[in-house]
Structures are given as C-alpha cells and as structure tokens.
Image: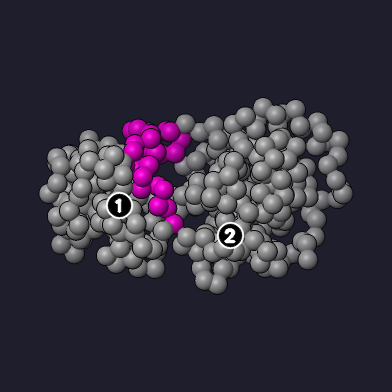
Amino acid sequence: MKKPYLAAGAGVGAGALALIGVLVLFVAAVANGAAGHQQSTAGVQAAGQGQVADIPPNMLALYRQAAPAACPGLDWSVLAAIGKVETDHGRYPTMRSSAGAVGPMQFLPSTFEGYAYPIPPGGANPPTPWDPTDAVYAAARMLCAGGAQTGTSNGLYKAIYSYNHADWYVNKVLAQAKSYAAAQPSDTGDADSDGASNPIVKAALTQLGVPYVWGGGTINGASGGGFDCSGLTSYAVYQGTGHRVVLPRTSQEQRHVGTAVARSEMQPGDLIVFNKDGWGHVGIYAGGNRMVDAPRPGKSVEIITLAGYWENYAWDIRRVA
C-alpha cells in the first residue's frame, strides 16, 4: 500500500515543467535519482540548508557508500538531501509520522519490504526501516527503481516527486542536494586537506560498512567477512601504497612503524594509535578531525569524529607512506 499524498496532484504539472530547465544544469553536478519512496510530515519540519558538516559522520559515510552500491550514477547528495528533509539525518525525536512512516528515511514498513534485500554490509538481520544502513540502502534502491538510472533531469524530478508527491518537496530536496554537492573540502570538515583523495584513506573508504571481526583482515584484502582495527589499517596501507608497505599485524606493533608525526602535523593517511588497553586501538586519519575506524564487535567500518571520546587517550601518530 502506498503512503497518502501530502500534496494534491496526480502528475508532473506546470510547476514541474518550469523546473526542468533548472534541473538540466543541476544534473551536471548531481546524478539522477529515481521514484520509489514516499514521505511523511515528520522530517519536513526538520528540513534546512546547511553544509556537509551538518551531516553526522556515520550518515555521511552511509550516503556515500549506498548511492554507488545500490544505484550506480545516483549522487550521494540526493540521498543525503532526502535524509535531511525527512528526519534531519535521524535527529527528529520520534521518527514516526501520522501516515505510519518510520525510521530515518521515513518508510512505510510495507514499502520498505520491497527494497530491503539484499541485506547491505552492516545492516540488521532481518532488515528494518529503523536501521540507518538498511533505510539508506532501501531509499537508494527505490530511487533507482523509479528512474534515477535514466540520467535525465526529468528522471530525477520524477524520482524525488515519487518519494513525496509535492512540487515543493522536490524543490526543497534539489536545493539541499545542490548545496551538499557543491560543498568544498572545507565544508566537510577536511579544512587541512581533502582526505578522500589520499590513496590510503580511499582504500579504507572502500570498506565502509564491512562488519568488525576480531582478528579479521588479511594483507590482500580477502578479509573473509570483516576487519578489526589493525586489520583495516593493514589492508588500507597495503592497497593505498600499491602493495609496497606491509604493516605488522597488531596495533602495538604498528605503533613503531614509519615516522613519528606531531599531532599538529597530521595528514590524511597517517595512522593514529591510541593508548587504550595498552595501545590497543588504531585508525586512519581522514582529515577534518575524522578517522576511518573498525571500532568493535557489533559495529562496522565507519567514519568517526576524533573529538570527544578519543581525546581521553594518548595518541601516537605514525606516517607510513
């Protein structure tokens, strides 16, 4: 059963046609999204502009991972814009609507079931619209199924319009997506450098959503289903250096490789070894006070902020490439 419309209208009307010309320019920067999901009033109240730094790191990682994985050609900024307009990236207090939609991307449970499989890396089993990973991947699949793969401005318009049947909603999502897509590295918090362009960071980012497995990870990337913290760093450094640098297996050993670097001189790709349980944790600096991390059992590889929790521990920073 489809969700009730929030706005009257049975098709793309005059307002939509007038918008197409603008969309032609927009699509050059943001790939098309497709029709599929419908939204409620819950997240509309949370909508706003704001730059990429407004997006929680775990949600930003999900948008960037799910878009190409579930709908090649769909720009992550479209998913992020819908997440913003729907529930402010999961910040809306209840994430329940009067129409029965739930979760960070506001799915009717019956609609969600049609796009919940296959279970994405790090998703819940069984899938649920309350799980951010499941919800974001399902949203990408629905957009793709509805026309995002066409690569046209009209396809993108109809895709977003199907998510919520209202011209004002399409305008709001497109404006937000354009804001996200146009954000420079400084807008993402990577003011010191563009971490995503570093080959070690880039290799680590390909593993976002891979589950944590104690002792998991091999030097050739055949992880057998997961990584622990030092397994991830070993993999990323090996791949990012063109198989030239092989790290020792544990965080305690990795603390002694490469060159020591002052915290004020950290660069993306540097290892950060933390004195937690005897220098027992390591991650990859990604720029902007963020780290790519395989945190602990029950979690998956993710991008996290270094502010707060990790400030409580001593750091040893190593440049290995």
Which three-letter amino acid code belongs to the residue tagged 2? Ala
**In the image, residue 205 lies in the stretch drawn in magenta:** yes
Range shown magenta: 185-209
- Which of pointers 2 and 1 indicates the residue nearer the eye? 1
Q: Distance between the residues labelled 2 and 1?
A: 31 Å
Which residue is the site of mark 1?
220
Quarter occupied by the C terminus: top left
Element at label 2: helix
Q: Position of residue 30 (x, y in %)?
A: 60, 35
Please tell me in which quadrant of the rendered image residue 18 appears.
Answer: top right
User: What residue does disc 2 label?
Assistant: 135
Q: Does residue 314 appear in the picture of this structure?
A: no
Foreground of the two, 150 or 301: 150
Label located before the other in sequence (2 or 1): 2
Residue at image point 54% right, 56% down: 91
**Count the marks: how many?**
2
Secondary structure, mark 1, is loop
> Of 198 and 9, which appears nearest the observer?
198
- Picture quarter with the N terminus: bottom right
Question: Would you say residue 29 is visible in this rendering?
Answer: yes
| x and y, in percent, of residue 282 in the image | 25, 54
**Label 2 with label 1: CB-CB less than 8 Å:** no
- At x 47%, y 31%, the residue is 184
- The amino acid pointed to by label 1 is Asn
Please rate how many residues cluster around mark 1, counting C-alpha atoms within 10 Å: few if below 14, some from 14 to 19, many from 20: few
Q: 93 or 52, which is in the foreground? A: 52
| In the image, residue 94 above or below residue 154 | below
User: Which residue is rendered at x = 64% and y = 61% of the image?
Assistant: 115
**Of residues 233 and 245, which is closer to you in this image?**
245
